[in-house]
Image: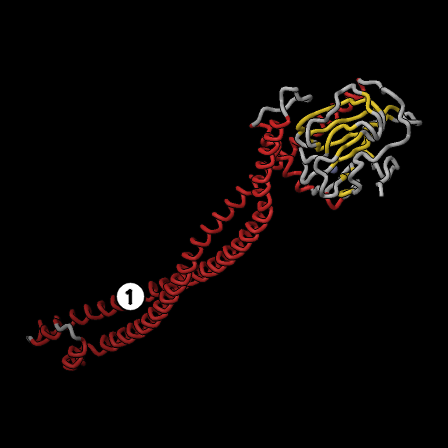
Amino acid sequence: MRKSFVRIVSALAVFAVLFMLPIPTASVSAAKTEEELRDELAKLKEEEQEIQAALDGLGDTIADQQAEVKQLYKKVSNLESQIDAYKAQITAVDSTIAEQNARIETLNTEITAKEQEMQEILEKLKKRVKAITQTTQYSSFQLLVNTTDYADYLLKSQVLASVSEHDQVLRLQAEEDKRTIQEKKVLVEQEKADSEAKKAELESLKGELDTQFDSLDKLYTTAKNKENKLLKEQNGYEKKLQDLQKSEDELDREIAALLAGTPPASTYGGKMYWPAPTVKRVSSGYGDRSLGYHRAIDISNGRSLGEPIVAAASGTVIKVQSMHYSYGNFCMIDHGLDANGVRIVTLYAHMRYTPSVTVGQYVTGGVTQIGQIGNTGNSYGAHLHFEVREDNVRVDPIGKGYVVVPT
Ligand SMILES: [Zn+2]
């Protein structure tokens, strides 16, 4: 079984670990024992499992985090628009208060004018009283003029009615006008007080929302930062994946160069043997898209570890490599040109140990054992990953009739 996710994870893991361990060279030296390789592999698997565990949750975590951010953003936006609505109402009340202040100002001016008018009338009256006292010695007039209580003054001034009747009428009218203006002013001041109470209420409501907004905005910022951090982490993995893709492309180029530099050793006989005689089951077919595009067949029956792998057809070993990050221990056999002049090459990957053949060795189809089924490289569970390449293009080994699953 090879899920694309597993592929990525294990490839990443191996890739990561390759930086920490001495990078195995193309043809492993004889000095490196199988024991050592198995130790390395064990370390790789351990790292793989750790990274897989981390990556496993990452996708879900990001989705959860994004949902949380979205929800918080909704709440914050909702609060913002409520706060904006209060701001608009407060602005409206402010302009009402400004109008009311202007009206009060106007009324104050009117009151001052009336008071001035009254004062002028009083001055005139004083002059006349003075004139009278000077001619009549009527000393009580002076007292009357000095009085501050106008009602009292009026009572007393009845005496003066004959001389000041016209002025009194004017003054009474002014007094009346002033009272009317003052009543208006009281009303406006009442309205203003109402406006100010309303404003205070709005500001208190807005204040509550402001507090809610502050704490929610903090949550939102924290959540958003967390999301960004996770995405950055994911980007890091994606970057590594791109590097791995590059490495894979490099391998393909390397193989192409190898084939170009090595003339076909023989002629493909047109017949292939099943490469794992004791394991008669395909666990993942060619082009299995639901599991990620797969240009090979995987052979496994769940008890495949250590089972022999034989050359599918006669030919010459052209590549042997240990611990490739993806293929693990693998080798390639060149079978020469077919009847159409197409060069046929087979590849056997994830072997348990370094293949037991060497570059340049002639192998016999169905006879020469080249290694054992293993679980190295980008592999979960022991299986043989078997490729048939036509002029270095991977084709379907079963679909194209190269091999038949034995019964
Ligand atoms: Zn495979």
Residue 327, given in percent of the width and then of the height, sits at 70, 31
- Residue kind at label 1, given as amino acid type: Ala
Q: Could you tell me which residue is drawn at 80 percent across and 27 percent down? A: 368
The colour scheme of the drawn protein is secondary structure
Which residue occupies the foreground of this view, 316 or 55?
Answer: 316
Q: Could you tell me which residue is drawn at 31 percent across and 71 percent down? A: 186
Position above or below: 402 against 31: below
Dot 1: few (<14), some (14–19), or many (≥20) neighbours within 10 Å? some
Q: Could you tell me which residue is drawn at 54 percent across and 45 percent down? A: 227
Residue on which disc 1 sits: 113
Position above or below: 205 against 225: below
The image quarter containing residue 154 is: bottom left
Relative side of 218 to 312, left or right: left
Residue 236, given in percent of the width and then of the height, sits at 58, 36
Residue 54, given in percent of the width and then of the height, sits at 56, 42
Q: Answer yes or no: is residue 99 visible.
A: no
Q: Quadrant of ligand 1?
A: top right
Which residue occupies the foreground of this view, 152 or 399?
Answer: 399
The image quarter containing residue 388 is: top right
The image quarter containing residue 259 is: top right
Which residue occupies the foreground of this view, 31 or 141?
Answer: 31
Q: Answer yes or no: is residue 161 visible.
A: yes
